[in-house]
Amino acid sequence: GVDAASGFGDVNLTGVDAAALRLSSRNGRISVDAVSGELNADTDFGDIDVARARDVTLSLNTRRGLVTFEGSLAPGQHQIRNGFGSVL
């Protein structure tokens, strides 16, 4: 799997094919493009943007931000949570 974390900055990944992606940012945006596998993303104050995902299992959580998703989902359960913001 891949782990990436930031306290005050953005987390950006492109083209990663891993069994599990665990991404977190306390005060920044999480952006992923062209990924597959299990995607766990968590941020306190920041957007989560997922583009061109392929067969992903989602667990996305932001307390204050915008969540956008574009792509295909793997079979199974998925979770998207947003405290104050939109899910698109």
Image (spheres, rainbow, N blue to C red):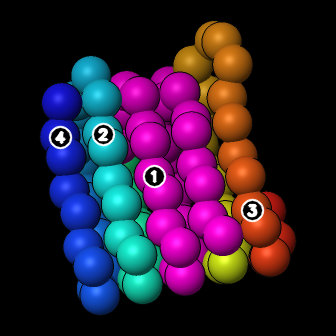
Label 1 and label 3: CA atoms lie apart by 12 Å
- What range is drawn magenta here? 35-63
Residue 58 lies, in percent from the top left, at 56, 35
Does 43 appear in magenta? yes
Give the residue at mark 2. Answer: 21
Give the residue at mark 4. Answer: 2
Residue at position x 66%, y 70% in the image: 63
Label 2 and label 1: CA atoms lie apart by 8 Å
Q: Are marks 2 and 4 in contact (CB under 8 Å)?
A: yes
Whether residue 7 sits left or right of residue 72 in the image: it is: left
Nearer to us of marks 3 and 2 is 3
Q: Amino acid at mark 2?
A: Leu
Residue at position x 23%, y 63% in the image: 5
Between residue 86 and residue 73, name the one nearer to us.
Answer: 86
Give the residue at mark 1. Answer: 41
Residue 83 lies, in percent from the top left, at 77, 67
Which image quadrant for residue 76? top right
Q: Is residue 86 above or below residue 37?
A: below
Q: Amino acid at mark 3?
A: Asn
- Quick one: SS at disc 1? strand
Q: Quadrant of the C terminus?
A: bottom right
Q: Amino acid at mark 1?
A: Ala
Q: Earlier in the sequence, mark 4 or mark 1?
A: 4
Local crowd at mark 1 within 10 Å, few (<14), some, or many (≥20)? many
Give the residue at mark 3. Answer: 82
